[in-house]
Image (cartoon, grey):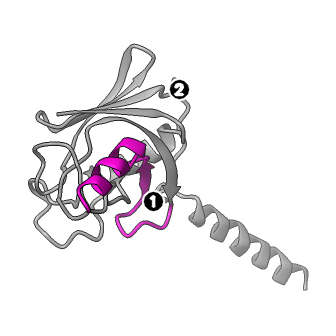
Amino acid sequence: MRAFKLIAALFLILGLAACGGKDSKFRTYNGPPITKVVVYKDARKMQLFSNTKIVKTYDIALGFAPKGHKQFEGDGKTPEGLYYIDRRNPRSRFHLSIGISYPNKADIAYAKSQGKEPGGEIFIHGKTGYKGDNKGDWTWGCIAVTDRQMEDIYAMVRDGTPIHIFP
């Protein structure tokens, strides 16, 4: 009986170790706090800052119609302006994702003045779930990085972090 308990305990320990192994999509971050995210749409770059220091730079993909500010649902554009990281989705169909606070009050008012909806559900996310060639701009207005990069971003960027999206 004692041998059975010992073997059962060993399997339990090995099983728990496997759950938190290096293949987990949930990573930890012990570096300087990320105080803002800056996106340069034309350059297809996203930078994470800690105060004035660039901590990390990523190549990105954008909405399939990347020129100009997102105004309406389905326009394929990525928003421009100051927004905030406002939510997290650990079960995203695009691996992991963090939400961007688009639309704000001005975005909603403009779309309504044109008799349209502003759209929403704008995220920074990975590429799992995308069926295309993973080249070029392909999202419906989101910002996409590789799944591995998204794991790091998800760990580094906290809700409430400002995100500045430039043309």
Image quadrant in which the N terminus is located: bottom right
Callout 1 amino acid: Asp
Q: Is residue 32 above or below residue 100?
A: above
Q: Is residue 103 magenta?
A: yes
Q: Is residue 117 visible?
A: yes
Nearer the viewer's eye, disc 2 or disc 1?
2
Q: Is residue 147 above or below residue 6?
A: above
Residue 80 or 145: which is nearer the viewer?
A: 80
Residue 160 or 54: which is nearer the viewer?
A: 160
Estimate the x, y position of residue 113 in percent, counting from the top left: 28, 53
Estimate the x, y position of residue 18 in percent, counting from the top left: 57, 65
Estimate the x, y position of residue 147 in percent, counting from the top left: 33, 56
Residue 129 or 142: which is nearer the viewer?
A: 142
Residue receiving disc 1: 23
58 relative position to 103: left or right:
left
Estimate the x, y position of residue 118 in percent, counting from the top left: 31, 57
Residue receiving disc 2: 33
Q: Is residue 112 above or below residue 164?
A: below
- Among all residues in the image, which is located at the extreme right? 1
The region drawn magenta spans 90-115
Image quadrant in which the C terminus is located: top left
Q: Is residue 4 above or below residue 17?
A: below
Secondary structure beneath disc 2? loop
69 relative position to 123: left or right:
left
